Image (cartoon, rainbow, N blue to C red):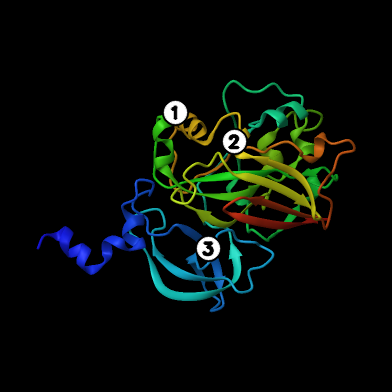
């Protein structure tokens, strides 16, 4: 009996693990298709594959459980175990990303509302790694930014799964580990020209200004990232509603562009831009004030919800 027949007889060929491991969309033969990082009811921090969910609603995780994932989440050296743990608190789906690479003005209607010409190439800025926040974490606004001009930006975030450089557009999605939801919190006080001279990175890199979650969803489930509805609610009111098909530069174009002459390391987070409806373009403007809640949602992934806290010292 050859090895292929042996696999058929054992049922491995029909198993989800086999399909995932040798799927053309799998990155490095990873075993999981949805990934969360969480504090369990056992008071330990785990990676896990959530059970019986598609989208995760951050407002309702009371009964959420996950199979523990062990090993390197970005390589073939991981497995989805049969050990099940209840979720106490969701954390950002990746730990210690090496960098946040962010794309500005990537939706035409957002460019129009901001009186900005559509760019010829993707506009890049970065966020500091300490900007990472949990999907339901409090966003602490430092005193230097507490002039009531904090803004919201729902964004599809791409997490790189395999080191790459000089990638062709047609190969770009092969290097994606998964997709998650982000909110590019922005202190417009420092992004504008009056005080900060247009300092995008400084205005967006304060600690906790990049909440991510609630899960990382693989390309196996989202083969085309430019087909997803995305929304932003502030205190329950929908202020942004669009679809990632409306990006000026699609996800493969962004990855290819960012990789030219630059190595993209596993865990790199790419924030792909926000659609129209941001606060500073409205008349009157709508800002995230102390105690306000911003809820970002993306189809097939779920929602994150964060509360603003203005610091006095």
Q: Is residue 119 above or below residue 36?
A: above
On the rendered image, what quadrant is the N terminus found in? bottom left
Residue at far bottom of view? 42
Residue at far right of view? 284
Residue 94: x and y, percent? 52, 56
| Residue 296 visible here | yes
Residue at mark 3: 37
On the rendered image, what quadrant is the C terminus found in? bottom right
| Residue 313 visible here | no
In 3D space, how far apart are the residues under numbered discs 2 and 1 (Cα atoms)? 24 Å
Describe residue 269's horizontal placement relative to residue 286 as left or right.
left
Contact, mark 2 vs mark 3 (Cβ under 8 Å):
no
Residue 80: x and y, percent? 39, 66
* Mark before the other along the chain sequence, 2 or 3: 3
Residue 178: x and y, percent? 48, 49
Q: Nearer the viewer, residue 163 or 175?
A: 175
Q: Nearer the viewer, residue 29 or 270?
A: 29
Camera-near label (2 vs 1) is 2
Q: Of helix, strand and loop, which one carries label 3?
A: strand
Residue 293: x and y, percent? 78, 56
Residue at mark 1: 260
Q: Of helix, strand and loop, which one carries label 2?
A: helix
Describe residue 96's horizontal placement relative to residue 263 as left or right.
right
Residue at 82%, 42% in the rendered image: 149
Camera-near label (2 vs 3) is 2
Residue at 81%, 37% in the rendered image: 280
Crowding around mark 1 (Cα neighbors within 10 Å: few <14, some 14 to 19, many 20+) is some
* Mark before the other along the chain sequence, 1 or 3: 3
Q: Of helix, strand and loop, which one carries label 1?
A: loop
Residue at mark 2: 245
Residue at 84%, 55% in the rendered image: 290
Q: How many marks?
A: 3
């Amino acid at each position: 009996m050859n090895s292929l027949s042996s696999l058929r007889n054992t049922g491995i060929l029909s198993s989800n693990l086999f399909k995932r491991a040798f799927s053309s969309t799998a990155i490095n033969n990873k075993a999981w298709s949805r990934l969360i990082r969480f504090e369990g009811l056992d008071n330990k921090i785990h990676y896990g594959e959530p059970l019986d969910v598609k989208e995760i609603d951050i407002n309702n995780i009371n009964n959420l459980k996950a199979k523990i994932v062990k090993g390197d989440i970005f390589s073939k050296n991981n497995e989805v175990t049969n050990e099940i743990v209840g979720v106490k608190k969701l954390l950002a789906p990746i730990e210690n990303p090496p960098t946040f690479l962010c794309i500005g003005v990537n939706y035409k209607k957002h460019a129009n509302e901001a009186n900005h010409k559509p760019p010829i190439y993707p506009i890049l800025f970065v966020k500091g790694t300490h900007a990472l926040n949990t999907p339901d974490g409090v966003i602490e606004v430092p005193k230097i930014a507490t002039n009531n001009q904090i803004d919201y930006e729902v964004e599809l975030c791409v997490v790189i799964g395999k080191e790459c450089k000089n990638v062709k557009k047609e190969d770009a999605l092969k290097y994606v580990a998964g997709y998650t939801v982000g909110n590019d919190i922005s202190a417009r006080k420092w992004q504008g020209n009056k005080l900060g001279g247009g300092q995008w990175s400084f205005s967006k890199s304060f600690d906790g200004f990049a909440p991510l979650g609630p899960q990382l969803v693989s390309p196996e489930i989202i083969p085309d990232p430019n087909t997803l509805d995305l929304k932003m609610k502030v205190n329950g009111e929908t202020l942004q509603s669009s679809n990632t098909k409306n990006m000026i530069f699609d996800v493969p174009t962004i990855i290819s562009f960012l990789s030219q002459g630059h190595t993209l390391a596993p865990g790199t987070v790419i924030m792909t831009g926000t659609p129209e409806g941001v606060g500073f373009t409205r008349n009157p403007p709508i800002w995230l004030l102390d105690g306000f809640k911003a809820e970002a949602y993306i189809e097939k992934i779920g929602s994150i919800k964060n509360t603003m806290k203005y610091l006095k010292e």
